[in-house]
Amino acid sequence: MTREREMVPEAEFRSYYGQPVIKPPVWHEPHMPTYLYLGGLSGASSVMGAAARLSGYGRLARTAGVTAALGATAGAVFLVAELGRPERFLNMLRVFKPTSPMSMGSWILAVHSGLTAVAAASEVAGARPVSRPAVARPAFRVTGARPASRPAARPVSRVAGYLPSAVAAVLPLAGGAASLIAGVATGPLMATYTAVLLADTAVPAWHEAHRELPFMFAGSALASAGAAGMLATPRAEAGPARAVAVLGAAVETAAGAVLERRLGLAGEPYHQGKAGRRMRAARVLTAGGGLLATVAGRSRALTALSGLALTAGSLLVRFGVLEAGRASAADPKYTVVPQRRRLAAGEPASLPPPARTWP
């Protein structure tokens, strides 16, 4: 036994003078977790809406398009409430920095909100072309011959009748293009960028989970979008929404299980205290809602139960993740112990920032 071991026993970390090493997140409830939920709902709904439109599910596409616009708008309201003043959000748009999740997230939200608003306006006005052309029927037959059917130029609703002719003429093309761009480009980013935003902080429970959080948030967003589609679309046309809900519930559950198992010490806040209770409740609701979604097409009651359970589970995931971050920041062992282990293994004390890699 060496002289050093006799005089100085191996130190065991217990506390950092009773104080946290890093500042805890200052985000508020319910503003920030609700914004995270609504952003995911909007992004996944736009993806589902574009896919439904291309595959001929007109009612589901309309529901998803309106849900995406409402989610983005309500999410922006909650974000402004979190920031305190509207001009603070506008100031965030003054900088365009691709390596900053905060800067990119602000621009993604702004562009996505505009695209979904145009697409939803087109859907509500009924001015978008449908996959199956409508057939104009004559008021009466002039002869005994079968009347020739002709497709209508576009289905026009009462809302479209109040629009200027120039707007009504441009709205179908603008709405179609906006729906496609939102579904392919901004929607997936909207559903996952908030996970990158959390992982780019020094909060141990978020930073250490940078591999799993995007998948968890993406699965949760799909589950919530599928739930909204199930609840607001006739059952005969809600089959794709139920499939999306089942897929999202499976991805969210699997990512959550991998996260808690891989993180080890840093994953403790996800299954302890208030955060643990929220995450367990979210897991039960999401798994139960996903299982019910497989048989929800049989009755409205099952559809309602499944949709509400998935919605509550998706919301609770965001509240649980936020609380886990607070708990890990308040206890210095979640910051100091992993750093010492990395240094003992010859690695840098801090993990490389995950913001360089977008999901």
Image: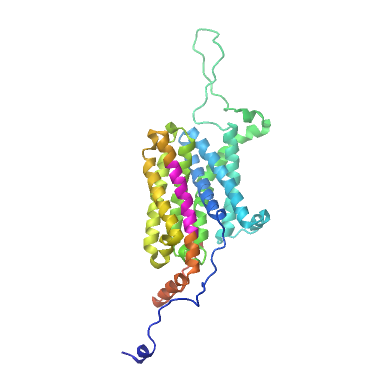
Q: Position of residue 93 (x, y in %)?
A: 64, 56
Residue at x-position 52% and y-position 22%: 135
Report the coloring of the rendering. rainbow
Q: In the current view of this chain or complex, which residue is farthest to the bottom?
A: 3
Name the chief secondary structure element in magenta: helix
Q: Quadrant of residue 275?
A: bottom left
Q: What span is in magenta?
A: 306-322
Between 221 and 278, the one nearer to me in the picture: 278
Residue 228: in sight, yes or no? yes
Residue 319 falls within the magenta-colored stretch: yes
Residue at x-position 49% and y-position 60%: 323
Between 281 and 355, the one nearer to me in the picture: 281
Between 133 and 285, the one nearer to me in the picture: 285
Q: Compared to 250, does 83 lie above or below?
A: below
Residue 226: in sight, yes or no? no
Quarter of the image where the N terminus is located: bottom left
Q: Position of residue 37 (x, y in %)?
A: 51, 50
Q: Position of residue 10 (x, y in %)?
A: 38, 83
Q: Position of residue 273 (x, y in %)?
A: 44, 61
